[in-house]
Every structure is written in C-alpha cells, then in structure tokens.
C-alpha cells in the first residue's frame, strides 16, 4: 500500500547511511506529510534510520516523547534535514573515531560507574535539573540529586577522574541546584550561546551550562587551567 508517493514501509538497504538516504529522498515535495509518516513508523518500529531522519528534521534536533513513550517533536519546516552525502560522511567519521573498542549500553548509570577504573576518564551529561521534572516530557526520567551526589562522592573516593555537565542558567535565572562544595569539584560555566526561548520572548539572554571537574581529573591534566581559577569562570564554546 502507498500513501501518495510515500511508501507504507521502508525496506532495509543494508546500511544506516543508505537507509537514511532512502528515507530522506522520499520526502521531496511533501515534507510535512512524510515527516508525520516517518514519526508514526518510528514509534511503531523504533528503526535507527527513522530516528536519524527525525533528528535531522525536527525542531532543535531535540528528542521529545509523550507520556506513552512516543516521539512527538514537530518538524522544522525551514529545512529538509542533513543531506545524505553529508550524513554518510559523518556516520563514517564517527564510526572510525569510535573504532572497535567502544561499547554502548542501556542500563542504570550506577552500573556503568561501578565498572570505572582510575585509568579511565568519565564524562557525564545527565538531564539538566531544570528540564526533567514530572511535568516535562522531554526526558523519560530525571536523575535523583542526592543519589547522584552520592555516586560522585564514591567516584572521588575511588580516585576516578570525571567531568560533569549538570545545571545551568539563562540570564539571572538558574536551573537546578549546584553540586555541593563537599565534592571538591572545580566549577566553570560554558557559554552555550543565545537562549532561543528568551529570543522568542523578545529578550537578549545568553545561556551558560555548568561544568564540574573532579580533583582526580585535574591531577591527570597536570594543573588547573587558567580559565578555571576564578570564582565564576566562563568558557566560550564554539560549535
């Protein structure tokens, strides 16, 4: 069966890049209808190339789910998403970078941290406190603050080097509670750019994301970088 010129099912082409290209090219001339079809198909099949297409086409490239666990973000109608040749190049570059020694898991973060060794380097980017409440469907589940602090304390005791990106602020508004001084972490703010939401409201606010560096990580680096020595340093991030 077919819906106009949109196939009711996407046949596998043999690779993530080729499957994405097949999905991307099928949107020409009916972008919004095709996006809605792909979203329904993904929520039914959870196929990787469909999620990749949705991320390339949706607003802010943000993963959003409803209470039923279905992807529900809307398309950005100003663009068609990353072109297949660019996507293929990026996929291959990431594959080469990760190599054969990378392992992905889907389990409780505490299980992963328990496996870390002092020779490892741990980077954690949990859902920000300000956007993972029960009323916010952008994340399936937030991270309990007290539990997270306990896990970081255990990493310190085991001398595991780590960096955490956790809270942040826009203008004078802070999102979430900062990690406690008792952990002995060096805190910096990363300038992430203009706040899209503030811009829509006619305000000119910049967004800063917090970065916490453990003592073990600093020892591995050799010294505290100059930009982290002030009380409230700011790092500028260029994407």
Image: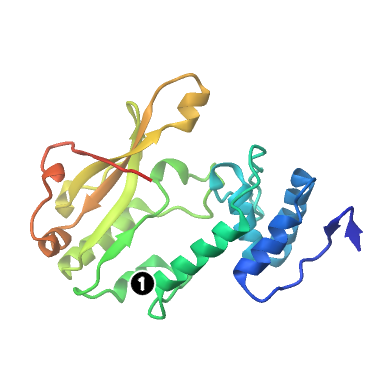
| Residue shown at 56% from the left, 46% from the top | 137
Q: Residue furthest right?
A: 1
Q: Which residue is mark 1?
A: 112
User: Does residue 216 appear to the left or right of 125 in the view shown?
Assistant: left
- Place residue 157 in its image quadrant: bottom left
| Colour mapping | rainbow
User: Does residue 195 appear to the left or right of 41 in the view shown?
Assistant: left
| Residue shown at 34% from the left, 27% from the top | 171
What is the x, y in percent for residue 96? 42, 72
| Residue shown at 64% from the left, 64% from the top | 49
Q: Residue furthest bottom?
A: 100
Between 104 and 28, the one nearer to me in the picture: 28
User: Does residue 95 appear to the left or right of 15 in the view shown?
Assistant: left
Q: Quick check: 215 above or below 197?
A: below
Disc 1 crowd, CA 10 A, few/some/many (<14, 14-19, 20+): few
What is the x, y in percent for residue 156? 18, 63
Viewer can see residue 46:
no
State the SS at label 1: helix
- Place residue 226 in its image quadrant: top left
Q: Residue furthest top?
A: 202
Q: In what quadrant of the picture does the N terminus appear?
A: bottom right
| Residue shown at 28% from the left, 65% from the top | 122
Q: Quick check: 196 above or below 176?
A: above
- How many marks are shown on the rendered structure? 1
User: Does residue 104 appear to the left or right of 8 in the view shown?
Assistant: left
Q: Quick check: 232 above or below 200?
A: below
What is the x, y in percent for residue 179? 25, 47
What is the x, y in percent for residue 178? 27, 43
- Place residue 53 in its image quadrant: bottom right
Q: Residue furthest front?
A: 85
Viewer can see residue 60:
yes
């Amino acid at each position: 069966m077919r819906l106009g010129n949109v196939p009711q099912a996407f046949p596998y082409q043999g690779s993530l890049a080729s499957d994405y290209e097949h999905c991307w090219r099928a949107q020409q001339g009916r972008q919004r209808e095709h996006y809605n079809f792909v979203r329904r198909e993904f929520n039914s099949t959870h196929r990787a190339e469909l999620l990749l297409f949705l991320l390339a086409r949706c607003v802010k490239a943000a993963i959003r789910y409803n209470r039923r666990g279905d992807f529900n973000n809307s398309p950005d109608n100003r663009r068609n998403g990353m072109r297949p040749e660019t996507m293929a190049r990026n996929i291959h570059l990431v594959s080469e970078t990760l190599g054969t020694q990378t392992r992905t898991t889907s389990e409780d973060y505490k299980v992963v941290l328990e496996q870390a060794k002092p020779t490892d380097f741990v980077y954690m980017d949990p859902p920000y406190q300000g956007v993972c409440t029960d009323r916010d469907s952008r994340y399936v589940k937030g991270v309990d603050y007290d539990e997270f602090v306990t896990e970081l304390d255990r990493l310190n005791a085991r001398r595991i080097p780590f960096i955490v990106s956790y809270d942040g602020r826009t203008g004078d508004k802070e999102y979430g509670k900062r990690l406690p001084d008792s952990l002995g972490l060096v805190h910096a703010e990363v300038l992430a750019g203009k706040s899209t939401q503030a811009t829509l409201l006619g305000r000119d606010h910049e967004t800063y994301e917090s970065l916490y560096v453990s003592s073990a990580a600093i020892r591995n680096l050799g010294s505290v970088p100059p930009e982290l020595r002030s009380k409230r340093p700011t790092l500028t991030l260029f994407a």
